[in-house]
Amino acid sequence: MIIQPSAVSIIQSSFEQIKPNAGRFTRVFYDRLFERDPSLKKLFIRDIREQRKKFFRMLGSIVKNLSNPDELEPKLQDLGSRHDYYSVKREDYRTFFEAFIYTLAAALGNDFDENTRHAWRDFCDYVGAHMCKEIRAEREEIMEQIRAQAEAATAVSAESSSEETVS
Ligand code: HEM
């Protein structure tokens, strides 16, 4: 799975926009996360103010390296393994990314247009698939279904065009 270069540039430029307000961004984000699922609070055993900073720094480094997947992807897998250890589950990624998209929409206002929403959705899918084995397996299954459907459609159209030639 890759993120299209056009989406990468949207992500990088909106990250530049939110960077000066990192403190506010991460406050809104974690507040929203715990509002959506208060049970997640207990997973964060260290100082949440430090965690906000660590999260934002890591986010910046991911965003910066999107065009460098060979370096980025093993790092995301290591980050994902550490998150297994923190007892983060597949469904927590969904809650996390929902809170993240909500925060981006609030931070970017009118600049959070359709293309920007899609670009960041792709970002979440990409990061999730590299951090979490279950998400990766789900995506592979979906891709396999799409491939099988496309092959079946090609077979049907080849069949019908050969019928046309015969008759
Ligand atoms: C974009 C995806 C994510 C990024 C970039 C990210 C980033 C980070 C970073 C940098 C740390 C500091 C420790 C370390 O590096 O291992 C951390 C810790 C942690 N993250 Fe994430 N994270 C992500 C997704 C999630 C999700 C989906 C959850 C689920 C709720 C989560 C929950 C936690 C917890 C519980 C800790 C440990 C906090 C503590 O020890 O107090 N993270 N995360």
Image: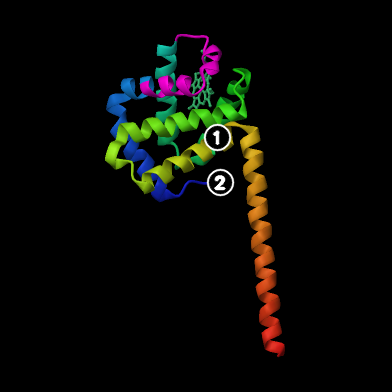
Q: Residue at x 72, y 89 (%)?
A: 166
Q: Earlier in the sequence, mark 2 or mark 1?
A: 2
Locate residue 153: give its quadrant: bottom right
Q: Nearer the viewer, residue 37 or 17?
A: 37
The answer to whether residue 75 of the structure is visible from this angle is no
Specify the segment rendered in magenta.
28-47
Marks 2 and 1 in Cβ contact (< 8 Å): no
User: Mark 1 is on which residue type?
Assistant: Gly
Q: Residue at x 51, y 40 (%)?
A: 69
User: Mark 2 is on which residue type?
Assistant: Met
**Cα distance between the residues tagged 2 and 1:** 11 Å
Query: Which of the labelled discs sits on residue 1, or is there none?
Result: 2
Percent of width and height locating residue 160: 68, 78
Neighbours of disc 2 within 10 Å: few (<14), some (14-19), many (20+): few
Q: Is residue 8 left or right of residue 139?
A: left
- Asked whether residue 35 is drawn in magenta, I would say yes
Q: Is residue 9 left or right of residue 146?
A: left
Neighbours of disc 1 within 10 Å: few (<14), some (14-19), many (20+): many
Q: Nearer the viewer, residue 66 or 146?
A: 146
Mark 1, ligand 1, within 8 Å: the answer is yes
Percent of width and height locating residue 5: 42, 49
Q: Is residue 101 left or right of residue 39?
A: left
Describe the element under mark 1 as helix, strand or loop: helix
Percent of width and height locating residue 72: 51, 35
Percent of width and height locating residue 85: 62, 18
- Asked whether residue 68 is drawn in magenta, I would say no
The mark total stands at 2
Task: Tell me the residue that label 1 is attached to.
Answer: 128
